[in-house]
Amino acid sequence: MDTPLKLNRQARQPLWLCAGLFLFLAACGSPPQATPTETSAATASAVAAPSATPAPTATDAVAPRTAIETYVVAEGDTLSAIATRFGLQPETILWANRNELAGYPDFLLTGMELVILPVDGVYHQIGGGDTLTNIANFFGANVEDIVAWPANNLQTSEDVLFAGNWLLVPDGRRTIAFQIMPNVPWEAANLDQGQYGRGACQDNFSSSLRTAGDYAWPVSSRQLAGDPLAAWHSGVDLAVADGEPVLAAEEGVVTFAGWSNLGYGMMVMLDHGNGDYTLYGGLGAVAVVCGQEVAQGEAVGEGGLTGHPAGALLHFELRQNGQLVDPLSVLP
């Protein structure tokens, strides 16, 4: 009885295997129609050259921007935030909007329409006598990059340029246009009000003050709410309420108090007697006068909108040994 049963099972095995294979193929569907060469190449590439950053798939790949766009400034926007949104350097946005911003990132206004380039660089209107070589040299760029940019519609570096047309100069650079208030020491505080503004002092002062340079926060928020210190921005923008007292970060002598013609709005500068200066810009009101000695924590003004028309921010600068220093590196 054992032998017939064993023979029957062996006889049935091919049938069961065929049936199982049929069911497997029916469930999985037809195999992909890829050539051996394509499959082998893909497999070899994946094994031989692993990458730390996987290549984007068709669903997550983002095509690079090639067209010039416009962006309407929203409430609370800063230049650095807009630049990050479009993957650009802040300077690129400043340079492309010189008429609106005049080189000052703090001049952003809600509703302002900005030109946004697709890549970092400058947008240049061709003048009479311009050549690709002198344009590239002027902006520190490469002729080949200008020719290669599709929207410029150029074929070679010898193409004739027509005055009035616009060229995108990839990686081109301009000089920063904004003016920085110079350090104003108490012994030379008498400045031209026509040049520097009504806040310029009309007398020089003397003092024996020498501070230790232990700085405190000038506002209660202790928070960066605008742009940081950068090559295109001379200080930090701190959160402050409209009308909130702005305090002296260290004791000092007032060497500027009032309106500034250099883009700071209402402004106060303190000479701390140790080679350091602090500047408080964008104030709504000034609470001190030229030559006054103020203690650390004493109010020098109020938060306001004169330096940041889109909202109340304190533009705060620290200068040490003639250099701009990031205040966030020294504040507690």
Image (cartoon, rainbow, N blue to C red):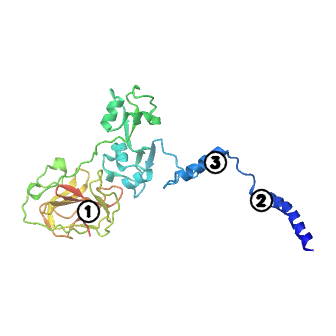
In this rendering, is residue 136 above or below 27? above
Compared to 186, does 160 lie above or below?
A: above
Camera-side residue of 47 and 156: 47
Residue 290 x/y as whole percent: 13, 60
Residue 50, above or below 138: below
Q: What is the CA distance from the residue labelled 1 to the residue labelled 3?
A: 58 Å
Please tell me which residue lies in front, 41 or 326.
Answer: 41
**Element on which disc 1 rests:** helix
Q: Quadrant of the N terminus?
A: bottom right
Amino acid marked by disc 2? Phe
In this picture, residue 323 sits left or right of residue 79 = left
- Please rate how many residues cluster around mark 1, counting C-alpha atoms within 10 Å: few if below 14, some from 14 to 19, many from 20: many
Residue 328 lies, in percent from the top left, at 28, 64
Q: Which residue is mark 3?
A: 39
Distance (Cα) linking label 2 and label 1: 69 Å
Q: Is residue 187 left or right of residue 158?
A: left
Q: Residue furthest bottom?
A: 1
Amino acid type at mark 1:
Pro
**Secondary element type, mark 3:** helix
Residue at the disc numbered 1: 327
The residue pinned by badge 2 equals 24
Residue at point 34% right, 30% down? 133
